Amino acid sequence: MSLARAAAFMFCDLCGTMLSLKTTEYAECPLCKFKKSAKEVCGKEIRYKVTAEDMRRDLGISHFGGKMEVKDMEINKKCEKCSNTKLKFSTRQMRSADEGQTTFYHCPSCLHTFSEN
């Protein structure tokens, strides 16, 4: 909480929008036009540290003992090799973001693996 209060000089007192320095005399809120003296804003600095754990938490990635666990899902699809109809699959983005994901299939019966783009 003290970090948030220390950074409050950058934000509008009325609506919380980030202030922009319009002139050398004042900073103004682009939303509600609240003005704050430039002396209150200029020369101040904010520093903070982001850890790997902070990034994992924000991205929703769980981390167990240095190894990330990927769980396969099941699908009713026929194995190319043994004709088993229960395959496990996972997807990954292997190419550029504007192209589809690659789906990897794994047969638990014969251990055959194959992929589809």
Image (spheres, rainbow, N blue to C red):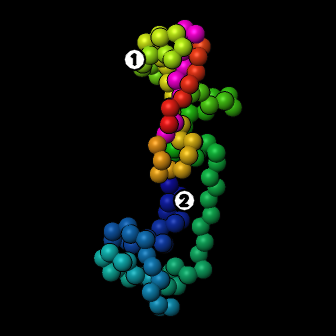
Where does the magenta region start and end? Answer: 101-110
Q: Nearer the viewer, residue 63 or 19?
A: 63
Q: Is residue 33 left or right of residue 71?
A: left
The mark tally for this picture is 2
Q: Quadrant of residue 114?
A: top right
Task: Measure the C-alpha gap from mark 1 to mark 2.
Answer: 52 Å
Residue 75 visible in rendering: yes
- Determine if the magenta segment contains residue 3: no
- Identify which residue is drawn at 48% across, 47% down: 99
- Determine if the magenta segment contains residue 102: yes
Q: Is residue 70 left or right of residue 33?
A: right
- Identify which residue is drawn at 50% across, 91% down: 24
Q: Quadrant of residue 64?
A: top right
Residue 43: % across, % down = 60, 80
Circle number at residue 76: 1
State whether residue 25 is above or below residue 71.
Answer: below
Amino acid type, mark 2: Leu
Residue 21: % across, % down = 47, 83
**Who comes first in sequence, dot 1 or dot 2?**
2
- Nearer the observer, disc 1 or disc 2? 1
Q: Secondary structure at mark 1?
A: strand
Q: Nearer the viewer, residue 98 or 30?
A: 98
Residue 57 visible in rendering: no
Q: Which residue is mark 2?
A: 3
Residue 34: % across, % down = 34, 79
Circle number at residue 62: none
- Identify which residue is drawn at 39% across, 72% down: 12
